[in-house]
Image (cartoon, rainbow, N blue to C red):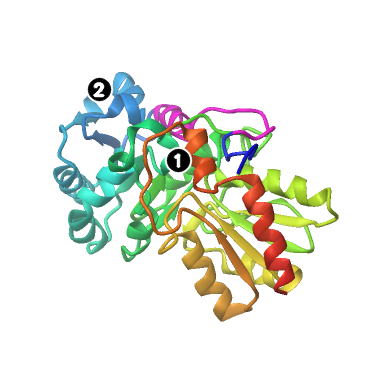
Amino acid sequence: MAGATSALQSKRPLGKATRDAFGRALEALGAERPDVVVVDADVSNSTRTEWFGQKFPDRFFNIGIAESNLVGIAGGLASCGKTPVIASFACFIMCNGYDQLRMAVAYPGLNVKVVGTHAGISIGEDGASQMGIEDVALACSLPGFVVVVPADEASAKAATRAMLDHRGPVYMRLGRPDVPKVYETDNPPFRLGQANTVRDGRDLTIVANGLMVAAALDAADQLAAEGIEARVLDMHTVKPIDREALKKAAQETGAIVVAEEHLAHGGLGSVVAMAVAELEPVPIRYVNLGDRFGESGSPEGLLEKFGLTAENLAAAARAVIAAK
């Protein structure tokens, strides 16, 4: 789409990457949480756990490129009363370590915090093999896991604290590039399982997470110029989903668009559809990666090619309103 506004090209002020915000928050929280230990799979300079390691070297462990072992170690640490935070690229920690996550963390319900960075196609030139595009679906399929996808720098910091405060396994998905600011405050409201309404509207609701929240706000601006008022929900917690916010949105706006930087199956769209079908069926449209792998290219170019743009969101909004 020529001249399209990708999810990274918002007019909103640019903030830090969510991985950076996580790294700084983890470093700061280490001082007040002596139970926290961090284990990384030889990518701490990319996941930003190195900042924790530099400040608390006796509580930081690099176990090398061995994600399955990473998860097993975390299970042992949690069994001993520690709060392990384990980190790697989303595709590595979820795909390579899935069996161990299933049996060494989810099955015993251990207090392990799993952080997958470099998620989605917005990592750019690294290409398909490095892109975690199925990670949310995999994490949601693990019984007992909470699954979190913060939208910007401020929400990622808040999500890190919420993740550590929660008792039980959590998966948090983070991105590589700097992302537009969704929240003007450094301390936005953040409660696991409770969506934030970042814009109100009566004609439809756009449910989004991650970098697609800023794109949703940009789409809402475009729609407002046409007299269409879109509500925008930052659905930062995919599991447990905020059923009440979805029910209210369906009842009050009568149509929903779901936007995510993830495959069509098993992610936010699937979870929203399942809830809405039960609670208050309304027309739904989806903006996501479809059923295809990513490829190598600039982050902005890939987001435009795969349709993760404000313009595509606005088109989906018009279509869903027509279906009401």
Indicate the secondary structure of the residue bearing disc 2. Answer: helix
Q: Position of residue 72 (x, y in %)?
A: 16, 48
**Magenta-colored stretch includes residue 67:** no
* Whether residue 200 is situated above or below residue 59 in the rendered picture: below
Locate residue 318: give its quadrant.
bottom right
* Whether residue 51 is situated above or below residue 106 in the rendered picture: above
Indicate the secondary structure of the residue bearing disc 1. Answer: helix
Q: Nearer the viewer, residue 143 or 45?
A: 45
Which amino acid does the dot numbered 1 rest on? Thr
Residue at 44 percent of width and 27 percent of height: 24
Q: Position of residue 226 (x, y in %)?
A: 83, 53
Name the residue carrying label 2.
57
Question: Mark 2–mark 1 contact, CB under 8 Å?
Answer: no
> Which residue extends farthest top?
54
The quarter of the picture where the N terminus appears is top right
**Magenta-colored stretch includes residue 15:** yes
> Which residue extends farthest front?
2
Q: Position of residue 268 (x, y in %)?
A: 49, 60
* Whether residue 259 is situated above or below residue 204 in the rendered picture: above
Of the image marks 2 and 1, the number of the one nearer the N terminus: 2
Locate residue 283: give its quadrant.
bottom right
Name the residue carrying label 1.
160
Locate residue 36: give its quadrant.
top left
Which amino acid does the dot numbered 2 rest on? Pro
Residue at 53 percent of width and 51 percent of height: 236
The quarter of the picture where the C terminus appears is bottom right
- Residue 189 visible to an observer of this rendering: no
Magenta segment = 9-28
Marks 2 and 1, Cα distance to the nearest angstrom?
A: 20 Å
Q: Nearer the viewer, residue 65 or 129?
A: 129
